[in-house]
Image (cartoon, grey):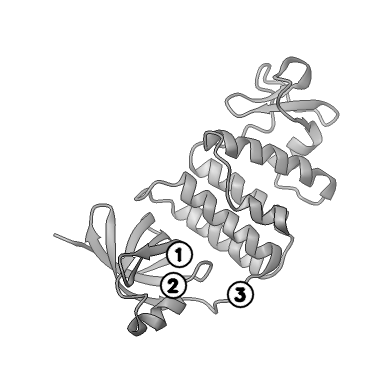
């Protein structure tokens, strides 16, 4: 028997053509996590209204039905004002979508993460500084997936992180004083680690270190595969 979901808050993460006139959507839902949904006929003339609606970064209410891994769209309606993104906020939003596509499995519910994503998009639409928005979401994503960062104590000794020391961050162990860690890893200041632990982004001088740290950790959990969305930042 087909399972039916009605008026589920959701965002389109990715869309690709499916057969002649349909599209396969990967959506992030509030209650069911990442879900694959076929939007039948959306590429045809009769589906023009849905085609304009089923875009990334717009909060939707989706109804769909199906069995197991793939579902069929029943209806879609807008749930917000569809504020547009451009420039760096747009590139940042694509980056968030790619993270979710690469790190979330279909069918794993993450209600808290849905709200974190919702808040991140709202911040980007308000044209807030992108770097703090991205770091907060990366931290929330890793925490939700069970990969939360250790930022307050040293991995080997358990001693508190010291502002004036330099560390390497090993994704499998945590922060290690630079003198005893793998020299291939970038150094991160203790002050930066402590600021990140407190979600304190008031000191812009730490932003490059925070970005380097998070990039290394995320790359580790993606087995070293590069993110395509990072190319957008390089071109900007």
The quarter of the rendered structure image containing the N terminus is: bottom left
Q: CA distance from mark 3 to mark 1?
A: 14 Å
Q: Position of residue 44 (x, y in %)?
A: 34, 79
Dots 3 and 2: beta carbons under 8 Å? no
Tell me: 9 left or right of 113: left
Q: Where does label 3 land, which residue?
A: 84
**159 w.r.t. 202: above or below:** above
Q: Where does label 2 land, which residue?
A: 54
Residue 185 is at least partly visible in this image: yes
Outermost residue, front direction?
20
Q: CA distance from mark 3 to mark 2?
A: 14 Å
Lower position in the chain sequence, tag 2 or tag 1: 1
Secondary structure type for disc 1: strand
Lower position in the chain sequence, tag 3 or tag 2: 2
Dots 2 and 1: beta carbons under 8 Å? yes
Badge 1, how many Cα within 10 Å: few under 14, some, many 20+? many
Q: Position of residue 225 (x, y in %)?
A: 54, 39
**Rendered image: mark on residue 12:** 1
**151 w.r.t. 45: above or below:** above
State the residue in front, 133 or 94: 94
Secondary structure type for disc 3: loop
**Rendered image: mark on residue 62:** none
User: In the image, what residue occupies the spot 64% across and 36% down?
Assistant: 216
Dots 3 and 1: beta carbons under 8 Å? no
User: In the image, what residue occupies the spot 69% across and 37% down?
Assistant: 213
Residue 5 is at least partly visible in this image: no
State the residue in front, 171 or 31: 171
**155 w.r.t. 208: above or below:** above
Q: Position of residue 152 (x, y in %)?
A: 69, 31
Lower position in the chain sequence, tag 3 or tag 1: 1
State the residue in front, 196 or 187: 187
Secondary structure type for disc 2: loop
């Amino acid at each position: 028997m087909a399972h039916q979901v009605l008026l589920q808050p959701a965002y389109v993460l990715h869309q690709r053509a499916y057969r002649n006139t349909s599209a396969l959507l990967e959506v992030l839902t509030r209650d069911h996590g990442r879900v694959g949904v076929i939007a039948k006929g959306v590429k045809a003339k009769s589906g023009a209204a849905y085609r304009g609606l089923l875009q990334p970064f717009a909060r939707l209410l989706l109804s769909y039905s199906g069995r197991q891994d793939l579902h069929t769209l029943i209806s879609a309606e807008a749930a917000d004002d569809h504020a547009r993104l451009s420039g760096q906020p747009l590139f940042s939003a694509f980056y968030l979508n790619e993270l979710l596509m690469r790190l979330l499995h279909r069918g794993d519910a993450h209600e808290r993460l849905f709200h974190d994503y919702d808040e991140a998009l709202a911040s980007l639409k308000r044209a807030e500084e992108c770097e703090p928005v991205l770091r907060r979401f990366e931290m929330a994503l890793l925490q939700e997936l069970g990969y939360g960062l250790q930022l307050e104590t040293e991995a080997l000794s358990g001693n508190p992180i010291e502002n004036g020391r330099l560390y390497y961050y090993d994704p499998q162990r945590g922060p290690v004083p630079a003198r005893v860690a793998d020299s291939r890893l970038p150094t991160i200041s203790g002050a930066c680690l402590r600021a990140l632990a407190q979600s304190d982004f008031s000191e812009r001088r730490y932003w490059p270190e925070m970005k380097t740290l998070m990039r290394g950790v995320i790359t580790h959990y993606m087995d070293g595969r590069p993110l395509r969305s990072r190319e957008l930042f390089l071109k900007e």
